[in-house]
Image: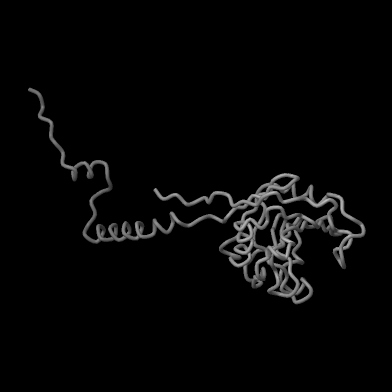
Amino acid sequence: MVPRRTRRRPADLFRLWGPPQLGRKGRRLRLLLAILFFLAAPALAQTPANVRVQLRTSEGDIVVELEMARAPVTAGNFLRYVEAGRLDGSEFYRAMHTASGAGLVQGGVRDPRKLFPPIAHEPTSQTGLSHIDGAISVPRLAPGTARGDFTIMVGNQPYLDAGPGSGGDGLGYAVFGHVVEGMDVVRHILAAPTSPTEGEGVMRGQMLQPRVRILTARRLPVRRLLVR
């Protein structure tokens, strides 16, 4: 005699392959967690990672990651120049060496017709960032005067951070990201020839000759958190 196959209901299949049955309180808790997850899922799916920008230069490509959450004003200002196309055709024009063998390269927009208004200063004491190797920062005179220039560190230079050791007003300079690709290009620019006579004040002898052109600056596709 052939055994009769029992047709299982969906609830029976869940008992076989799913978690054990929960009491009323357990079911309510599970339902609440499911609701919270689905409410949070759209926000997670729309949360971008830090923005990345590719600088295509005459010496090679540099990719920087901008700290949009930690330094929103300064990173947003840099991104504004990128998205407006105002860094296209600009230059790296300065290479500064320190006694310890570290240094920085400086570039950006120097045409006054392409400059946006100055931005508020975001000191490293506020952002928690630091002038470490590969950090990208913004030069300034008084706080609130930074515009379209930027610097990239070669080696750690904590004396540029806000604090008693920074000199001047003690507020240092605003770090807003770091290099993730192309530090070899940055070091190559730092080692490039400079004019012994060009430049004023502390920048005398630090002006690149010839300049290193920034051909294009483009925002790279945003990576997003995947919610399954």
Query: How many numbered circles does the render carry?
Result: 0
The colour scheme of the drawn protein is: one colour
Quarter of the image that includes the N terminus: top left
Of residues 16 and 147, the one nearer the viewer is 147
Which residue appears at 70% of the width and 62% of the height? 137
Which residue appears at 64% of the width and 49% of the height? 54
List the single residue furthest toward the right: 197
Say whether residue 23 is left or right of residue 216. left
Which residue appears at 13% of the width and 31% of the height? 5
Residue 19, given in percent of the width and then of the height, sits at: 28, 47
**Does residue 17 lie above or below 194 as drawn?**
above
List the single residue furthest toward the left: 1
Residue 78, given in percent of the width and then of the height, sits at: 64, 61
Q: Quadrant of residue 71?
A: bottom right
Say whether residue 151 is left or right of residue 84. right
List the single residue furthest toward the top: 1
List the single residue furthest toward the front: 113
Of residues 113 and 170, the one nearer the viewer is 113
**Does residue 118 lie above or below 101 as drawn?**
below
Residue 140, given in percent of the width and then of the height, sits at: 74, 69
Which residue appears at 42% of the width and 59% of the height? 43
Q: Quadrant of residue 13?
A: top left
**Does residue 155 lie above or below 17 as drawn?**
below
Say whether residue 44 is left or right of residue 49. left
Residue 56, given in percent of the width and then of the height, sits at: 68, 47
Q: Quadrant of residue 130?
A: bottom right
Of residues 83 and 121, the one nearer the viewer is 83
